[in-house]
Image (spheres, rainbow, N blue to C red):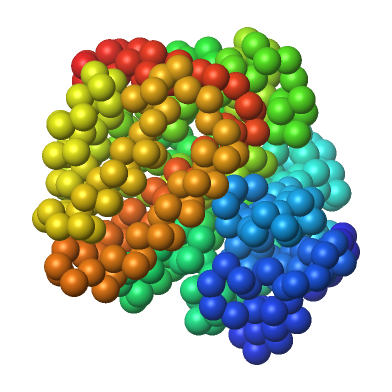
Amino acid sequence: MARDGSLPTGRLGRVVRLAGVGARAGASLLLSKGGGDAAEYAAEVLGTLRGLAAKVGQTLSYVDGLVPEAQRENYEKALGKLRDATPRSAPEAVRRVLEEELGAPVERLFASFDERPFASASIGQVHRATLADGRAVAVKVQHPGIASAVESDLENAGVMEGLVSTLAPKGMNAKAAYDEVAARFREELDYELEAERQAFFARLHTGDARIRIPEVIRERSSRRVLTSELVEGLSYDAAIAAPEADRRAWAETLWRFVFKGNLVGGMFNADPHPGNYLFGPDGRVTFLDFGCVQPIGPERLPAARAMHLAALHRDEATFAAECARLLGTHGGEYGTRAVAYSRRCFEPMFGSPFHITRDFTTSLVTELRALKRFFWAKDNSFVMLPPAMLFLNRLQFGFYSVLARLDVKVDYASVEHAFMSEAGLV
């Protein structure tokens, strides 16, 4: 993959490049029929495009069930490079963004600043730096031109359909779904909003020795620059090769972070890809990147909590009733199947201790796709999924895929009972 290069921002230029990897509606955006060479080419093009095109590639690199089994190994290996190594923006362009955003020369802003980024992703890249007081920090700078590139992708039906198809089955109001995707990804361009959300999650998990969220350095942050304390840790690839006891402790921490955020904080971080975690001793995990965060509105939070409590108590009847309330179903074949599908998603709670495997996650993706046939249900039982649930699907499949590679049996119900009790919800 090219390490430096200009970012194509125009809609036509981006469409032409996507056409080179067989871009068309749905997740088939990336799935040309070739082998390793085709996968490498797809990674190269999507990395160069960055923006939403790279996000599709990132998602397909680790979520089980989205890539056909025969092609999975090639695409996961190639597209995995997009998780933290998209092409870098030129040093002089990064310097311009920093100085425009923070209003001073780089040498006055930082005691030291490494022009070589140690990570580069779909929206920005991250540099090591030190402050005048000696603190080591990570400086995330948006790729110059990325806002225009994202808008070009949002206007490209092929890219948008590819994004939506990785998040939801057929049967969701197309315009509402696209609007939801567009809103979340436009928010990712606002690092001031991300800083607020990062601080929110830090407050929510204050005092938890296993959950670490880097402190935001407000005076060195703006809409296109986000400076946080620099944190070190093991990568996800190193974590999945660690001893079983370590992997189990990390899986417990991940579950606590995700579902405490959902059920206690009423917010979930909807971008669970493996590059957003750093792993440490004693089950400690550092959580990075709070750009894609979905609020859980008051119209859904009570039902979501009730479903989790029902799972904790293994109360099938209450779970089914609350699930129907959350989904807005009203009986019929679709209603029955939709509730049954949701119950399968909750098996790690009902069946705790539970071993989330890649086969289990793949089966959930396959079963969700199968629900699309009820779009034509003769008993008129089909109901549109609320657009706000798009990113819940992204979290569910992405998060389970992350846990599956840790490859351990975990008592998720005990983890959840602990933080629900702390919050007075049990």
Q: Position of residue 74 (x, y in %)?
A: 79, 56
Q: Residue furthest left?
A: 330
Whether residue 394 is visible: no
- Residue beneath the point at 67% across and 41% down: 275
* Front residue of this view, candidates 363 and 227: 363
Q: Position of residue 373 (x, y in %)?
A: 34, 67
351 lies left or right of 386: right
- Residue beneath the point at 80% across and 44% down: 118
Q: Residue furthest bottom?
A: 12
- Residue beneath the point at 71% across and 28% down: 240
State which quarter of the image contains the C terminus: top left
290 in relation to 371, above or below:
above
Kindly indicate the quadrant of the structure image that contains residue 50.
bottom right
Total tally of numbered discs in the picture? 0
260 lies left or right of 198: left
* Front residue of this view, candidates 36 and 178: 36
* Front residue of this view, candidates 89 and 346: 346
Q: Position of residue 28 (x, y in %)?
A: 61, 71
Q: Position of residue 204 (x, y in %)?
A: 39, 26
- Residue beneath the point at 48% across and 52% down: 365
280 in relation to 373, above or below:
above
291 lies left or right of 336: right
State which quarter of the image contains the N terminus: bottom right
Kindly indicate the quadrant of the structure image that contains residue 43.
bottom right
Whether residue 366 is visible: yes
